[in-house]
Amino acid sequence: MEVELTFVDETKQDVVVWQADRTLARDMLGFIRDELEKRGLGFGDIQGIGTFRGPGSFTGLRIGMTVLNTWARADHIPIVGSADEEWKEICLARLLAGMNDEVVLPEYGAPARTTKPRK
């Protein structure tokens, strides 16, 4: 599973890609922390979060959305999401317009496949 993190400031966009595979839940916050530190930033310096809502992996979207929604809520950061192909541009425009979804829900693209209870 590939995770893409894009930092946006007044002058540029900086994209970082991380091959998370099965370590997403364990390492996502550490990955974000390390990338922030490389730029001389901390979690409190972030002014907005934009996220891809899907469709995609049930587990990946669920973990990613949980981490980002929790961070946004805890630090009072606006968060927006989009399931469109141009999701980054849409999210940035929405954030710049002062929008905040407060909670972004994933778009799986199909019903989740879950196993039936054995009893």
Image: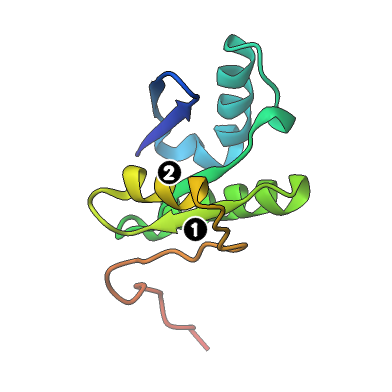
Q: Is residue 28 left or right of residue 43?
A: left
User: How far apart in space, not on screen, are marks 1 and 2 (Cα)?
Assistant: 22 Å
Q: Quadrant of residue 11?
A: top left
Marks counted in the figure total 2
**Rendered view: 65 above or below 29:** below
Check disc 2: other Cα within 10 Å, few if <14, some if 14-19, many if 20+. some
User: What residue lies at 64% left-to-right and 14% top-to-bottom?
Assistant: 37
Of badges 1 and 2, nearer the viewer stands 2
Residue 5 point in image, percent of width and height? 44, 31
Could you say whether the residue bearing mark 2 is in a helix, strand or loop?
helix
Say which of 80 and 12 sits in front.
12
Screen quadrant of the N terminus: top left
User: What residue lies at 70% left-to-right and 30% top-to-bottom?
Assistant: 43
Q: Which residue is mark 2?
A: 92
Residue 38 point in image, percent of width and height? 58, 10
Amino acid at dot 1: Arg
Q: Which residue is mark 1?
A: 62
Say which of 21 and 30 sits in front.
30
Residue 61 point in image, percent of width and height? 43, 55
Residue extending furthest toward the left: 85
Pointer 1 or 2: first along the chain: 1
Could you say whether the residue bearing mark 1 is in a helix, strand or loop?
helix
Q: Is residue 64 left or right of residue 91?
A: right
Residue 113 point in image, percent of width and height? 34, 73
Residues at marks 1 and 2 touching, judged by CB atoms closer than 8 Å:
no
Amino acid at dot 2: Leu
Q: Is residue 97 left or right of residue 112?
A: right
Check disc 1: other Cα within 10 Å, few if <14, some if 14-19, many if 20+. some
**Rendered view: 21 above or below 83:** above
User: What residue lies at 58% left-to-right and 12% top-to-bottom?
Assistant: 39
Residue extending furthest toward the bottom: 119
